[in-house]
Amino acid sequence: METKTRLGELLVRQNKVSQEAINDALRIQVGGNRRLGNILLQMGVLSDDQLASTLSQQLGIQLTDLNEAFSEDAKQILPRYLCTKYGALPLSLENNNILVTAMADPSDQEAIKDIEHFTGKGVEPCLAKQSEINKAIAQKVPYSIKDIFNPQVNTKLTRVIATAALVLVVIFGIATYNYIQSSRYGTVSQLSNSTLYEHLDLMVAFEKSGRISLLGHSAFSDGYYSVAFENIHTLRAFVLSRRNDFSVKQSKWLEWVLDKERSHDAIYSSIVNSD
């Protein structure tokens, strides 16, 4: 049985790479699963053309023209992040569930196995230059939801989308909170000389001078209120005396307004006393 010449030996024999460079690449390769050819490319001691021609000779296969071999039906079979990870580009889906795939190193059995596991198809590898595969991936393979949420990907697009999603979540949360608060308590407006509470056809204004006004329509009375009070205690007494005029929701809201303003006065008094 004929033994296939190893890539490193073939490169040295053809004077494309020195034995010293091969030894350095092999030391880098120890303990990992990276292909020797890719390491040599990263080291800058071997060109893309040199690697492709040597692999073509070693494996006994011709380089594939990606533009001619590529079929649009194959562009979504493998997500972009896996194409990039394995330096592979699906070209076409043939009979018997065979996926013809361009690879910078068709002898990379680990990449082939992973692609087969992901796609559920048998991979028939063919040879192409790494630079041409990278260019074709960018041009022919669209981004998908798998690319965006894949934890192995850390691209600018992913960061932008993740940031935008987070901003939308925060905005939605604030909007939801404000809607709930508005539905439950109405609106609170801080004016130059007063604080104005509005809800359920009622309006209560607390002026900085201490004067309080109650305006609006209660659920079980005719006409509209327009009453002024000297302090919060007289307002509370009025609300209690007319409690049958207000609906349950109106009564609860007025009680909330009174408690809120009483708490505000207590905080203000403690600050003044501490000074």
Image (spheres, grey):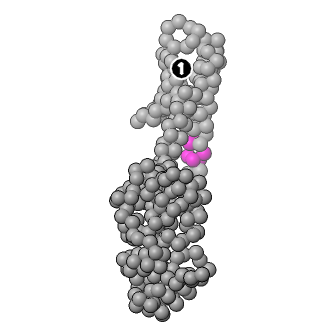
Query: In this rendering, is residue 143 above or below 220?
Result: below
Q: Residue furthest front?
A: 1
Residue at position x 58%, y 63% in the image = 114
| Residue under label 1 | 200
- Whether the magenta-drawn stretch holds residue 269 is answered as yes
Query: In this rendering, is residue 273 above or below 140?
Result: above
Q: Amino acid at mark 1?
A: Leu
Which sits in the foreground, 169 or 199?
169
Q: Quadrant of residue 191?
A: top left
- Element at badge 1? loop
Residue at position x 60%, y 45% in the image = 270
Give percent across and percent down for residue 45.
Answer: 41, 85
Magenta residues, dominant SS class: helix
Give percent across and percent down for residue 163.
Answer: 47, 53
Which sits in the foreground, 112 or 197?
112
User: Can I make out residue 161 in this image?
Assistant: no
How packed mark 1 is, by other alpha carbons closer than 10 Å (few <14, some 14-19, many 20 or more), is: some
- Whether the magenta-drawn stretch holds residue 229 is answered as no
User: Can I make out residue 43 in this image?
Assistant: yes
Residue at position x 59%, y 25% in the image = 253
Give percent across and percent down for residue 59.
Answer: 48, 75
Residue at position x 48%, y 72% in the image = 105
Which sits in the foreground, 268 or 116?
116
Query: In this rendering, is residue 178 above or below 41?
Result: above
Q: Quadrant of residue 47?
A: bottom left
Q: Which residues are drawn in magenta?
A: 268-273
Q: Quadrant of the N terminus?
A: bottom right
